[in-house]
Image (spheres, rainbow, N blue to C red):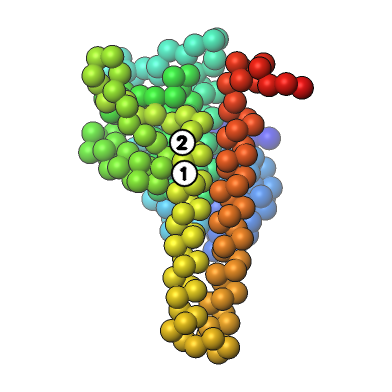
Amino acid sequence: MPGGRLTQQERQQIALGLADRLAYAEIARRLDRPTSTITREVMRNGGPGSYRAELAHRATEQRTHRRKQVAARGAATPPQRHGRDPEAVRAYEETFTTVLMQSGLAKMMSRVLACLYTTDEGSLTASELVERLQVSPASISKAIAFLEGQGLVRRERDEGRRERYVADNDVWYESMMASARATAQIVDTAREGVGVLGPGTPAAARLENIARFLDFVSESTARAAEQAREILYASPEKTADTPV
């Protein structure tokens, strides 16, 4: 299986495959590349609907040039703990970012979240994020504002009164609960429409079915989140004291 960077010809083959609506796995098979390589390439260059081979190739060259400039200034990859391979960590962060983008997050939001989750502390300051991701403070501020609004990160002050952005176990719990509350609002609105459109009418029946489905999903999500938090994130002290 070939390694190294994608060539311009391979990118043209990717573009043709996307135009033919081929799955990433099929494109990867034809190029004898890992599916993850194709997925990352497409997602970081506009997605399947906007991918252009020439633009993708040019963007890659520009990224390579920027990395060389950073290295020349001495801003190397941050030192890794526990004997980790810096290149393997960087590649994993790219993969994690791509998966988050596929779930619906924008690229910068995905990069910030992946960066937070792959630090041992689970928290970074704005300046640390700027340095690690090599982007502007404004980009970080915008990404954090969105992630915080979605319940995916939270803010806290450290001992030096610096503001830190945190992504820990409770963040996903809060995000799931926020999603359940948003779904519950849709349920309420759908049931309100039943009264407006008239019970027994086709439109009202459709809204009632939507409400019943989403009500079940919302309650199940909230219940599962509560149970998972209680079981999976229980402190060792509580677990030890719990009678068998």
Q: Is residue 38 above or below residue 213?
A: above
| As drawn, 232 above or below 227 | above
Where in the figure is residue 62, as x and y percent of width and height? 34, 37
Q: Amino acid at mark 1?
A: Ser
Q: State the separation of the CA atoms marked 1 and 2.
A: 6 Å
Q: Residue at x 46, y 86 (%)?
A: 197
The percent position of residue 218, horizontal first and vertical second, equals 56, 56
Please provide percent x and percent y for residue 239.
65, 20
Task: Bin the neighbour count of mark 1 within 10 Å (Cα to Cα): few under 14, some 14-19, many 20 and up.
Answer: some
- Front-most of 242 and 219? 242
Q: Residue at x 46, y 54 (%)?
A: 181
Q: Which mark is residue 106?
A: none
* Residue that appears at 68% across and 35% down: 1
Image position of 155 with respect to 159: above or below = below
Residue 114 shows up from this direction? no
Apparent side of residue 4 relative to residue 107 in the rendered image (left or right): right
User: Mark 1 = which residue?
Assistant: 175
